[in-house]
Amino acid sequence: YTRLQDKLQDKAWRLTKGGLTMLWTSKHAWCFKEPVDPVKHQAPGYYDKVKNPQDLQSIRNRVEANEYNTPLEVDRDLDTMVQNAHEY
């Protein structure tokens, strides 16, 4: 049973990492690739409105550093990243 769980977890991580690579290489991902700089990105008040900022580079770095316990945590941060864009 544990071996099956390990296999499924490994598969989930491979899919998650593959999905992040696909997102990163998308031509539409440019606005999500780095943390928002309110001056550089002309986003005044961004950090007043967005309390939990997320970006693809930070998420990728946390995946590579094994800071996530499960792929679902990665998914939550990706959802937050998109919600932040909609909110702002």
Image (cartoon, rainbow, N blue to C red):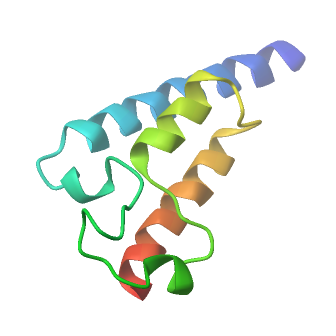
Answer above or below: position of 79 versus 65: below
Q: In this view of the protein, which residue sits in the foreground, 9 or 39?
A: 39
The quadrant of the image that shows the C terminus is bottom left
Left or right of residue 58: residue 6: right
* Image location of residue 74, percent across then percent down: 59, 46
Q: In this view of the protein, which residue sits in the foreground, 1 or 8?
A: 8
Answer above or below: position of 41 versus 18: below
Q: In this view of the protein, which residue sits in the foreground, 65 or 34?
A: 34
Left or right of residue 60: residue 11: right
User: What residue lies at 31% left-to-right and 77% top-to-bottom?
Assistant: 43
Answer above or below: position of 22 versus 42: above
* Image location of residue 30, percent across then percent down: 20, 52
> Where, by quadrant of the figure, is residue 63 drawn?
top right
Q: In this view of the protein, which residue sits in the foreground, 82 or 52?
A: 52
What is the count of numbered marks?
0
Seen as rendered, the residue at the extreme left is: 27
